[in-house]
Amino acid sequence: VQTFGRKKTAVAVSYCKKGRGLIKINGCPIELVEPEVLRYKVFEPILLLGRDRFANVDIRIRVKGGGYTAQIYAIRQAIAKSVVAYYQKFVDEAAKREIRDILVSYDRSLLVADPRRCESKKFGGPGARARRQKSYR
């Protein structure tokens, strides 16, 4: 099953298939994700659902674009969505619904993309909203 996760401009595409519990990100194991401060963010879907649900699936993830924080959020969304999609297609609807409820009750951004984007800069100021300070003399 192929799914994707998005955050800002980062896109993570995950390919989930029957296997023995491997999770690789750009060819590297998930334990070596940089920066390590955000490593728990990637592990969140796995810790929430328990290792046993990931024991018989392999997930391979390609991620590009965005900064490293956005990439981490895209990866965790891709993992969560791919497991839900895999359980819907190959297992049963009840297991899928159970997984989905666990993930949504913890954090909705694990399954639903965040639509916020960067606002473009306008003329007459240094940023999107900030304007030059007005002075009278």
Image: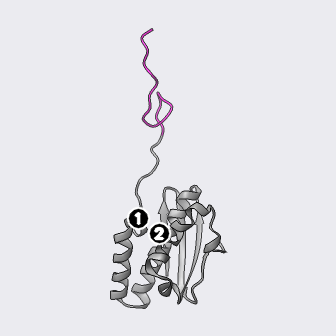
Label 2 CA crowd tier, 10 Å (few <14, some 14–19, many 20+):
many
Percent position of residue 57, x then y? 53, 86
Image marks 1 and 2: residues in contact by CB distance under 8 Å: yes
Residue at left 51%, top 83%? 51
Residue at left 33%, top 76%? 101
Q: If the image is split into quadrants, where does the C terminus sit?
A: top left
On residue 31, which mark appears? none
- Does residue 25 appear anywhere in the picture? no
Q: Label 1 to label 2, Cα distance in Å?
A: 7 Å
Label 1 CA crowd tier, 10 Å (few <14, some 14–19, many 20+):
some
Q: How many marks?
A: 2
**Residue on which the image places disc 1:** 109
Query: Residue 50 or 116: which is nearer the viewer?
Result: 50
Residue at left 63%, top 63%? 34
Verify whether residue 126 appears in magenta: yes
Label 2 SS: helix
Residue range highlighted in magenta = 121-137
Up the image or down, 131 lies above or below 79; here it is above
Percent position of residue 12, x then y? 54, 67
Label 1 SS: helix
Identity of the amino acid at label 2? Gln
Percent position of residue 56, x then y? 53, 90
Left or right position of 66 against 109: right
**Residue on which the image places disc 2:** 77
